[in-house]
Amino acid sequence: MESSVLDLAALKRKRDLRIIFPVFLVSIIACLDRVNISYAALTMKEDLGWLTPEIYGAGAGIFFAGYLLLEIPGSLVAAHFSASKWISRIMFTWGLVCVFMAFMHSQTQFYLCRFLLGASEASLYPVIYSVLFPRWFSGRERSRANSLLLTSLLIANIIGAPLSGVLLGTSFFGLHGWQELFIIEAIPALLFAVFFFFVVKDRPDQVSWLTAEEKQYLEKNYEEEQKAINGKKKYSVLQAFKDPKVLRLCLIYFLWVVGFWGFYFWMPTVLKSLSGWSTQLIGGAIAIPMMVALLVQVFVGYSSTKTGDKVWHVAGILFVGSLGLGLSPFAGSVGMALFLVCLSAIGIHAAMGVWWSIPTTFLTGPAAAASVALINSCGNLGGWVGPYMMGWIKTNTGTFDLGYFIMGGAMFLSGLLVLSLKYGFGLSKAMDDEPVLAEENN
C-alpha cells in the first residue's frame, strides 16, 4: 500500500490521541507517585523523628533496588505476553503501595514501601520504549513520540509541585498533610489502570479506529524496519547483554541518572533551606524551571526527528545540565539558584526522548526489551547512588556542595560518552544511519 493514498497527518493524529496520550497520562501518574516523597519530606521529619537526611536519601534511593530486581524479567514478560496489560498491572500495584506509604511509622516500613514501589513500577518505561512504541511508530518517529511522552515528567512536576505544597498545608480526617499527599496521588493510578487495560492495544491489527489501509501501512513499515535492523545483526538476549554498544549505553545512563535523581529528590529541600520560603511557595517556584525544560524538550524531540541527529541532541543537553549542577554551590541568591535549577532541569530532562530512541536503532524484539531494561536498570543504580550520596554528604560535611560537583561531573562524562557513540574517541563507533521508511519521504 503506497503512503500517497493515505492521509498521514490524520494517521499521526490518531496515534497521538490513542497511543501517546494514554501512555503520557500513565507517565504523569508514575512521576507523581515516584517523587512525591521529595515534597512529603519537607514535613514528614516533623512527625517521624527517625527520618534523618541519610535515612531519607537511602529510602529515596532504595526505590531503585526494587526497580532493578524486576526490570529485566518484567520487560521479557511484556515482550512475550502483552505490553498494554503489563502496564495496567504495573499501575495498579504501585497505586496500592502508595496508599501503604501514608501509614508507615518506622524506618523499616519506610524502606520496605520504597522498595515495593520500585518493584511495582519496574519495567514500565522499557516496555513502552521497546515493546509498545515500536509497533506503532517508526525509528525516526520514536524520537518525537518518546519526547512527547517524556514531557509528562515535567508536566507532572508543574502540576505536582504546587499541589504537593497545598496538600502539605492541609489536614483532613486526622491525617497529616504528607499522608493525604500519598493517598490522593495514588487514586489516579488505581482508576486509570482499569481504563488502560481495556482501551490501549498492543498492535494496529487489534484496534477498530484504524482503516484496513492504515493497519497495512503500519504493519508494512514495522516489518521493513525489523528486517533492516536484523539484516545488520540479529541479537539474542544474551548477545545483546554482552554487546559493547549496549554496555556503553548502560554506563552513559548510570552517570546521567546519578545527576537526575540526586537533583530531583533533594531539590525542594535545598531550595527551601536557601530561600526560607514556605512549602506552598517552594512548590510554585519549582514549576518555573520545569516549564522551561518542557519547552526545550519538545523542541529537541522535533529537531532530532527533522534532522535525524541523535548524538549531538543528547550530548549537548547533558553538557547544559552539567553546567547547571556544577555551578549550583556558587549560587549567591535565590534568583541565581532558580536560574541554575532551570539549566539543571533542562540537562536532566530535555534529551530523554531522543535518548530512548537510540537502543531500538540496532535492537529488536525480546533483545530490545531486555537491553532497554538493562540500560534502565543501570540507570536505576545511579538513581540509588545519587540520592544516597547527597544525603551522606550533607550528614558528613554539613553542605550539599560536593554532591553537586560530583553530579555535574557525572553528567559531563555522560555527554562525552554519548559523543563517542558517533566519533569513537578511541572506542568503537556505535551509531549507524537508520533505515528510511516510506512515510519519512512525505
Image (cartoon, helix red, strand yellow):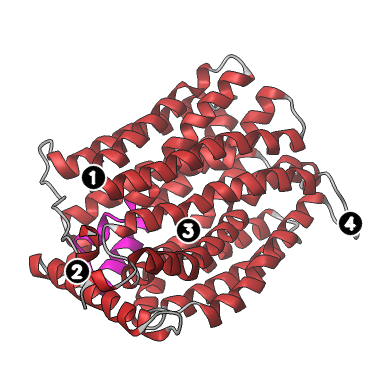
Q: Residues within 10 Å of mark 2 (few under 14, many from 20)?
A: many
Quadrant containing the N terminus is: bottom left
* Image position, residue 217 (x, y; %): 27, 76
User: Alpha-carbon distance for marks 4 and 2?
Assistant: 54 Å
Identify the residue at horizontal 65%, vertical 72% (top origin): 190
Q: Residues within 10 Å of mark 4 (few under 14, many from 20)?
A: few
Res. 144 in view: yes
Front-lying residue, 281 or 217: 217
User: Alpha-carbon distance for marks 3 and 1?
Assistant: 33 Å
Identify the residue at horizontal 56%, vertical 55% (top origin): 31
Q: Is residue 291 above or below residue 97?
A: above
* Image position, residue 319 (x, y; %): 34, 31
Indicate the secondary structure of the residue bearing disc 3. Answer: helix
Front: mark 4 or 2: 2
* Image position, residue 103 (x, y; %): 76, 61
Front: mark 4 or 1: 1
Mark 1 or mark 2: name the one nearer the start of the chain: 2
Mark 3 or mark 4: name the one nearer the start of the chain: 3
Q: Which residue is mark 4?
A: 172
Find out whether residue 245 is within the magenta segment: no
Q: Are marks 3 and 1 in contact (CB under 8 Å)?
A: no
Q: Which residue is mark 1?
A: 309
Q: Which portion, as a residue range, is magenta?
A: 355-377
Front-lying residue, 22 or 331: 22
Indicate the secondary structure of the residue bearing disc 1. Answer: loop
Mark 4 or mark 2: name the one nearer the start of the chain: 4
User: Alpha-carbon distance for marks 1 and 2?
Assistant: 18 Å
Could you tell me what secondary structure mostly forms the magenta stretch?
Answer: helix
* Residue type, mark 1 in image: Asp
